[in-house]
Amino acid sequence: LASGYGRGRVVYLPAELDQAMFFYPNTYISAMLLNAMKWVAQDVPPPIEVDGPLVLATTFRRQPLQNRVVVHLLNDQSSYGRHSIYQKLQLPGQGLTGPWAVRREVIPLLDIKVHCRVPGITKARQQPENMDLPLTKTPDGIEVTVPRLEMYSLVVLE
């Protein structure tokens, strides 16, 4: 349900789409959530945007006292099929549930773009690689490119 009052907007999602997205990631659910957030925000762009493949999971945290933003990047590919994690399988006489989440390989992600609109950012590092990332100025902030992501990295913007 989408509604507005005065200059404000609100979207109510009666189904647990956030939980559905967590347990069973789906392109249509993610598009619905993203479109709802953009519609509510109107013309205010997000402070951080990440451009990468759909298997890339991201989040960020602001640390205003340090004028720092930490962007978390997770290469969320699976070798076993994402949906199988949550299917319960009882093995007779063993009391075990399965299947087990075992990653058999890591396929790196390349050239991930992180766009930051937080003012005052002058440097970026990829951690734990401890690698400086060059800043590129954009009309509304800065952009950095993460050249390679194995499984998990942070982009620390200060």
Image (cartoon, rainbow, N blue to C red):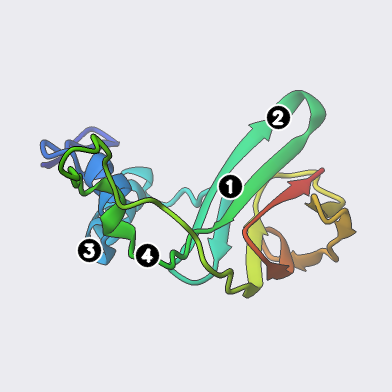
Counting residues from the start of the chain, the first of labels 3 and 2 encountered is: 3
**Residue 1 higher or lower than 45, as above or below:** above
Mark 1 or 3: the one toward you: 3
Picture disc at residue 47: 1
Residue 59 position, x and y percent, is 54, 45
Inter-mark Cα distance, 4 to 1: 34 Å
Inter-mark Cα distance, 1 to 3: 24 Å
**Residue 148 higher or lower than 127, as above or below:** below
Counting residues from the start of the chain, the first of labels 4 and 1 encountered is: 1
Q: Which residue is mark 3?
A: 28
Say whether marks 4 and 1 touch (CB < 8 Å): no
Inter-mark Cα distance, 2 to 4: 36 Å
Counting residues from the start of the chain, the first of labels 2 and 4 encountered is: 2
Residue 57 position, x and y percent, is 49, 55
Locate residue 2: give its quadrant. top left
Q: Residues within 10 Å of mark 4 (few under 14, many from 20)?
A: some
Q: Amino acid at mark 4?
A: Tyr
Residue 47 position, x and y percent, is 58, 47
Picture disc at residue 74: none
Q: Amino acid at mark 2?
A: Gln
Per the image, label 1 sits on a secondary structure element best described as loop
Q: Amino acid at mark 1?
A: Pro
Q: Which residue is mark 4?
A: 80
Please give the name of the residue rendered at 44% of the width and 64% of the height, measured from the top-left corner. Answer: 78
Say whether marks 3 and 2 touch (CB < 8 Å): no
